[in-house]
Image: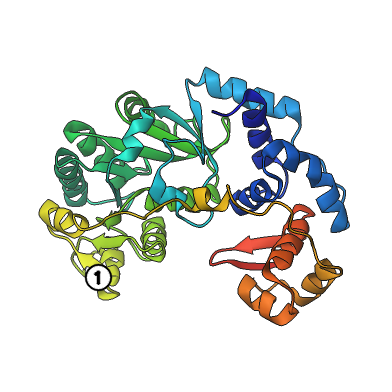
Amino acid sequence: MLSQEEAFARIRLLRSPNIGPVTYMQLLARFGDAQAALHALPDLAGRAGRPYEAAAEKRVQAEIVATRKAGARYLFHDSPDYPGLLAHCEGAPPILTFRGDSGILARPAVAIVGARNASAAAVRLAREFAYGLASAGFTVVSGLARGIDGAAHTGALAGGATIGVIASGIDIAYPPEHGALQERIAAEGLLLAEQPPGTEPLARHFPTRNRIIAGLAAGTLVVEAAPKSGSLITARLAGEMGREVMAVPGSPLDPRSHGCNQLIRDGAVLAQSVEDVIELLSGFDGVPGSRFQSEGKGAEPQVRLEEGAEISIAHLLTTAPIAVDELIRQSGTNAPSVQMALLELEIGGRLVRHAGGRVSLA
């Protein structure tokens, strides 16, 4: 059980400037707890040549009040209810807010996503797929968007359980017309948000929401999607996580089907029925252990930065992303020292992390 002081410190740490999920977990592993990490932040940023102030305590206090007012609670990465599949993903959110039954996270899940401007036939199909999968014991995960997402949630609620992952704060309904559906999911299923209460849904929040949708599920089913749509981002993320990717084929004459047809052409499993999805996912045995659990306890908290390492690493970096493994090879410095140098540069606002374990100068 977390103490109130440590829970508060964790929220404050994650809300502090230049602290993302990867940096957050590295700091916990390095210093043992969030309180010690917060104390060390100014010194770490100072090594990168920048002054630093953590998130204001009043701001965190206001967030906690808003979370409680919304009827929500916090879910930390080391909570027993934190989903193992999501914890295994790179950059998984260390803290989520939720409304509803967090026990749903322990059940096998499948994501259903698709076009916002979906055809009537696709909406009906998504609803039927969701109902059948929920009736078979799967939790249906989606993003509460218009079109396919809303149909998936509605069908799943009729057949069993659903999880809605939103790009806004837990207290904001988006899109507005799904306000009643969002409340129903919170009452009968589970509503998840990574952003603090009061956060409006911005364009940059949707890809991060999509990684949670893909990370929660054993597989992602795309019912209808145009090329370059957010649904294809979710499918790509699912594939990168080693999860199953499925797509419902459609007419080549309808642009809304081109994304699904391309997915199938690229190797996604063609799904024409609920039975197809169940058969594919029946052999999925999950991911043993948890990345968070393996990184935390037992990690050596006393890694020391080699003399001059922060300078040599900074000189090797440019604005073009490069893999951390490549930095280790080129620098001739040991991996822990490189990671610490990158951590200090990031906290100092000089480093940007990219997908695939790549970094660049800010």
Q: Position of residue 97 (x, y in %)?
A: 50, 33
Which secondary structure lies at badge 1? helix
Against 264, residue 1 (above or below) is above
Viewport quadrant of the N terminus: top right
Q: Is residue 217 left or right of residue 300?
A: left
* Image point (22%, 37%), residue name: 156
Q: Is residue 241 left or right of residue 149?
A: right
Give neighbour class at mark 1: few <14, some 14-19, many 20+ (Cα, 10 Å).
some
Q: Position of residue 106 (x, y in %)?
A: 33, 39
* Image point (50%, 21%), residue name: 70
Against 283, residue 252 (above or below) is below
Q: Amino acid at mark 1?
A: Ile
Q: Position of residue 107 (x, y in %)?
A: 28, 40
Q: Quadrant of residue 161?
A: top left
Count the labels in the image. Answer: 1
Question: In the image shown, does 304 or 62 lie closer to the viewer?
Answer: 304
Q: Position of residue 44 (x, y in %)?
A: 81, 52
Q: Quadrant of residue 258?
A: bottom left
Q: Quadrant of residue 99?
A: top left
Q: Give the residue pinned by disc 1.
A: 264
Instruction: Report if residue 123 is visible in the image.
Output: yes
Question: In the image shown, does 131 or 261 lie closer to the viewer?
Answer: 131
